[in-house]
């Protein structure tokens, strides 16, 4: 087993690939902002099961998707905070031409996606640096 085949590094690589694919899809949405009948698309985030991570053995997974290894653990409620609005609609406007691309929303998604990618890439690099230190190559 190679050092780069560790589950954590695999998870970070999967996440970076997901961010790259999402950036391409967001760019396609922006490129088709004037095409009649075009609806914007987005990728679903990869779950722990698709990345190869699973809940600990014997852990109960609640409705919030968080594994609880002890009955005394507190789960999340429907409202995650004082300003959370579960009724908030995450839709988009549709123009008379049938196009549903909102450029401001797509640009915000692209910016968030870029910063998330940079975070994951930084974590990947720091993990590799830590492994090099542990092996004595640095």
Image (spheres, grey):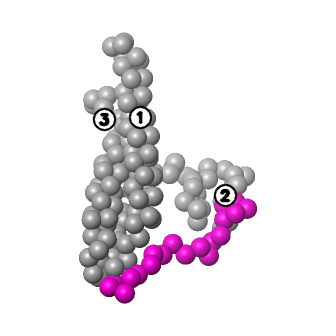
Q: Which mark is residue 122?
A: 1
The image quadrant of residue 22 is bottom left
Residue extending furthest bottom? 96
Q: Is residue 49 visible?
A: no
Percent x, y of residue 93? 44, 78
Q: State the quadrant of the N terminus.
A: top left
The disc, 2 or 3, on the residue closer to the chain's N-terminal end is 3
Badge 2 density bin: few <14, some 14–19, many ≥20, Cα 10 Å: some
* C-alpha span from label 2 to label 3: 33 Å
Read off the residue under disc 2.
75
Percent x, y of residue 59? 57, 53
Percent x, y of residue 116? 44, 47
Q: In the image, what residue occupies the spot 36% across and 13% down?
A: 138
The disc, 1 or 3, on the residue closer to the chain's N-terminal end is 3
Read off the residue under disc 3.
5
Give yes or no for residue 6 being in the magenta stretch. no
Q: How many marks?
A: 3
Badge 1 density bin: few <14, some 14–19, many ≥20, Cα 10 Å: few
Mark 3: secondary structure? helix
**31 to the left or right of 58:** left
Percent x, y of residue 46? 39, 56
Relative depth, front residue between 79 and 38: 38
Give yes or no for residue 90 being in the magenta stretch. yes
Location of residue 38 with respect to 113 vertically, above or below: below
Q: In the image, what residue occupies the spot 66% across and 61% down?
A: 80
Mark 2: secondary structure? loop
Location of residue 60 with respect to 34 vertically, above or below: above
In magenta, the rendered stretch is 80-98
């Amino acid at each position: 087993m190679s050092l780069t085949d560790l589950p954590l590094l695999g998870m970070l690589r999967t996440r970076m690939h997901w961010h790259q694919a999402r950036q391409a899809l967001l760019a396609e949405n922006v490129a088709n902002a004037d095409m009649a009948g075009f609806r914007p698309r987005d990728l679903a985030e990869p779950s722990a099961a698709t990345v190869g991570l699973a809940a600990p053995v014997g852990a109960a997974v609640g409705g919030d998707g968080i594994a609880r290894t002890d009955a005394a653990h507190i789960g999340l409620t429907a409202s995650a905070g004082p300003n959370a609005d579960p009724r908030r609609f995450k839709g988009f406007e549709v123009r008379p031409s049938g196009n549903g691309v909102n450029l401001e929303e797509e640009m915000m998604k692209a910016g968030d996606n870029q910063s998330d990618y940079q975070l994951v890439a930084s974590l990947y690099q720091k993990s590799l640096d830590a492994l090099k230190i542990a092996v004595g190559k640095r």
